Amino acid sequence: MRRSSEALSAADTAWLKLEQPGNPMIVVGLLGLDGTLPLARLRDVVRARFLRFPPFRRAVIARDAGAARWQDESAVDLEWHVVEEALAAPASDEALQARVAQLLGAHLDPARPLWRMHLLHGWRGGDTALVVRIHHACADGTALLRVLLALTEGAPEDLHRPHRRLDAHGHGPLAAVRSGAHGAGAFARLLLLPPDPPTSLRGALGNGRCVAWSRPLPLEPLRQAAHASGATLNDLLVAAVAGALRHELQVRGECFAGMSLRALVPVDLRPPSELDALGNHFGLVLPDLPVGTAGPRDRLAATHARMDALKASAEPVVAFRLLRALGAATPRVEAPAVRLVHEKATLSLTNVAGPRARRTLAGVPIDTVLYWIPAAGGIGVGCSLISYAGAIRLAIGADAQRLPVPARLVADFERELGRLAGRVQNSR
């Protein structure tokens, strides 16, 4: 019987084209469980809840010649897609981080549906970590979170909070880009942006990856501190990342007064009618992080002003159109386009709102939720923020040549948040 097939969108195809040896375009999620989950029970959950999403029952065909297409598989081999292993003793956070780093750099089998799950036993003595790897052609970071939560049990939540619906009321980038002059201006600004300052955080990527993550940091005190300063919680978090990068560059002797580094920040563009859709439907903005500004409060003020200016920008839609163009481009056009992105920014920075209440997986409580996005366009440092059950965590995924000690950046981020919250509250 002939299997049905369907063309990939241009935006999804772009992620196949961005893949390079040693640098797969894979979004990685981690669910840390407070207890042990048997492999058989996980496979039952995957069969019932995960395989209902069509991309996970399909393989990609004609990747190198002609248009790429999804083709339905007659059966998905869960013995290959869902595997288990024991972490090397002692199975501390460091051992888990080392294994996650290996998985970030491991390619998926192109002949199979583009996902795999790794059930890692023995973490923290008797706990389990589930690492889910999904190719970016299947889903972006927001869609990955929805998929992860589809595996779990708990009260239903709207992960697309009102502030994330960028065009729900006819405002924001989708409305802005409808005025051709605004869209053309954003496109010109993107092309004319000068390259980011040359630092050792930028450069050719190696073959090794490294990861680190923060402690869970309570959200409410941070939100209160941000609002007391006239900023948003997101402004506070971005300012803390800027402060951590400042210290990293100071250690390397590469920081100077007034210096800024750009971040690639995804912006969800799904309309309300498509909130549950997978695939890729996001744009990008490139805020300047004020790493050369001394003083946490001054960095917060500068970050707030810069992020505020981007909220009504057409840049996210322009970037989405460029991504679609890359998916339809010839190899002659692809390399300059990727180089253009690489020159404009030093890091990627994502912020996803996760569940406000704790959830379970096959009845086992989940105490940790983390994720990483790939090093697209040669960007070697990735920072992912995610909230869960009233706390926020930062996860770093980096090229080992660009950021060999990501734990230092994590520690500096935690320290910066403490300074920001303390100084703002002390000034009231």
Image (cartoon, rainbow, N blue to C red):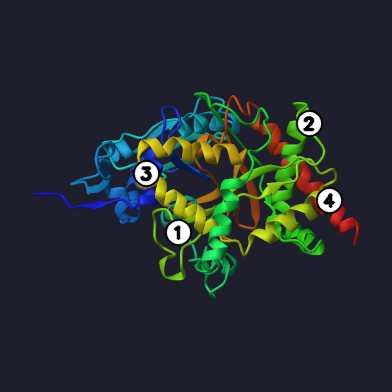
From mark 3 to mark 1, how far is it between C-alphas?
A: 42 Å
Is 108 placed above or below 233 here?
A: above
Q: Which residue is mark 3?
A: 329
Q: Earlier in the sequence, mark 4 or mark 1?
A: 1
Structural distance between the alpha carbons of marks 2 and 1: 45 Å
Marks 4 and 2 sit apart, C-alpha to C-alpha, by 18 Å
Choose between 426 and 294: the one closer to the eye: 294
- Work out whether residue 196 or residue 69 is closer to the camera in this orientation and state it: 196
Query: Which labelled disc corresponds to residue 250?
Result: 2
What residue is disc 1 on?
A: 153
- Which of discs 2 and 3 lies nearer the camera? The answer is 3
Q: Residues within 10 Å of mark 3 (few under 14, many from 20)?
A: some
Asked if labels 1 and 2 touch by Cβ distance under 8 angstroms, the answer is: no
Q: Secondary structure at mark 1?
A: loop
For disc 4, the marked residue is 298
Image quadrant in which you'd find residue 273: bottom left
Residue 142 appears in the rendering: no
Mark 2 secondary-structure assignment: helix
> Disc 4 versus disc 1: distance between alpha carbons?
43 Å
In the picture shown, does residue 134 fall above or below 122?
Answer: below
